[in-house]
Amino acid sequence: MEFHFEILKTGPTGARLGRLTTPHGMIDTPAFMPVGTAGTVKGLTQQALGELGVQILLANTYHLYLRPGHERIRRLGGLHRFMSWPGAMLTDSGGFQVFSLTELNKVTDEGVVFRSHLDGSEHFLTPEKSIEIQQALGSDIAMAFDECIEYPADHDRAASSLKRTTAWARRCRDYARALSSDGIRTNAEASTNPGQSIFGIVQGGMHADLRRESARQLVDLDFPGYAIGGLAVGEPHPLSIEMAALTAELLPKDRPRYVMGVGFPEQLADYVRCGVDMMDCVLPTRNARNGCLFTSAGRVNIRNAIYADDPRPLDKRCACMVCRTYSRAYLRHLFHANEILASILNSHHNVAFFLDIMGKIRQAIAFGELAEFSSEFQARIEAGDPK
């Protein structure tokens, strides 16, 4: 299947109901992508993900490059085959991890020299290397290498990052085009997914004029899809929404739009109203491993003593396997007993909860009721857990 994006309906706020077709399947949008950093969504099998209705996963270039290595994955047939995942997959560029996980790195216009967080070994990641790794992995969507900066960042710092990000995006595009047009590749250069598409990433910090300029420059490069990067880095949520909205408005209406690294359940509809089609976040599984569970009445810290004798399901509005089967008391027991099953069940529920919210958001867009859904959901979150 060729890469194709179709908008089925646009709501009055700008929310879009769509369908994204990739070489490994179709995705209903707006979509939430669970994060499978090292080729696995922590605590969940690929079979469980399929049963939950996951259509697309995110995997991480930086981590898979360091371990087990992109050439090994290439030799084994690409990441889809390596991890036995039949659905669509997106890989990030590795840029965010290079800047956030490594204390020692040096950024130049050529690329980034960094030391592995695993063994301290030195590596040089360039736009071309990022695309080479992602082609070896064989994701359906690859992200252009970008420079994700800290918050807050002044105008000069953000402008410098914007300039570098655009230059790197052009190099990613040109490198991928050159490889596809050469017709002469060694086995080490061959893509494990010839239908792979590359998305450009808009940067510019929290400066509206720089966001506009970054969007303009990337649109000129004519990518099949675009991401809004540099959000969820510590800025207030209203500012995040402001940057997402003004950026999305400048991106082509016929291309998918992806906000990277967001957000909490009650925030998802806010980004969708900006005209965003795709989102991802590590919150469902990371919080699950720490005993923080998302419900329709807000967050539940299952570690708390008040749940020790609580026979109720975690969330009576949730139809997932965990809420149908286990009590809060049992989930608390598993967590305090340090049982592996605690992470498995907690992760299963949290991922199911995020996917269910996005499904309800799609339904609300279809019926023109997104504003009502969002306000009702927010009210339940604020009201909390009825005893």
Image (spheres, helix red, strand yellow):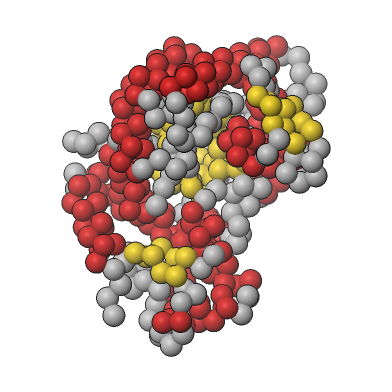
Say which residue appears at 55% left-offset and 48% top-offset: 35
Say which residue appears at 38% left-offset and 81% top-offset: 312
**Relative side of 27 to 358, left or right:** right
> Can residue 24 be seen?
no
Q: Which of 331 and 120 is in front in this view?
A: 120
Q: Nearer the viewer, residue 345 or 29?
A: 345
Q: Position of residue 218 (x, y in %)?
A: 46, 17
**Relative side of 29 to 107, left or right:** left
Q: Quadrant of residue 5?
A: top left
Looking at the image, is 144 positioned above or below residue 23?
A: above
Say which residue appears at 18% left-offset and 36% top-offset: 12
> Can residue 65 be seen?
yes
Say which residue appears at 39% left-offset and 65% top-offset: 299
Q: Quadrant of residue 335?
A: bottom right
Q: Nearer the viewer, residue 244 or 357?
A: 244
Looking at the image, is 240 positioned above or below residue 54?
A: above
Q: Position of residue 61 (x, y in %)?
A: 65, 37
Q: Which of 306 and 362 is in front in this view?
A: 306
Q: Position of residue 375 (x, y in %)?
A: 21, 53
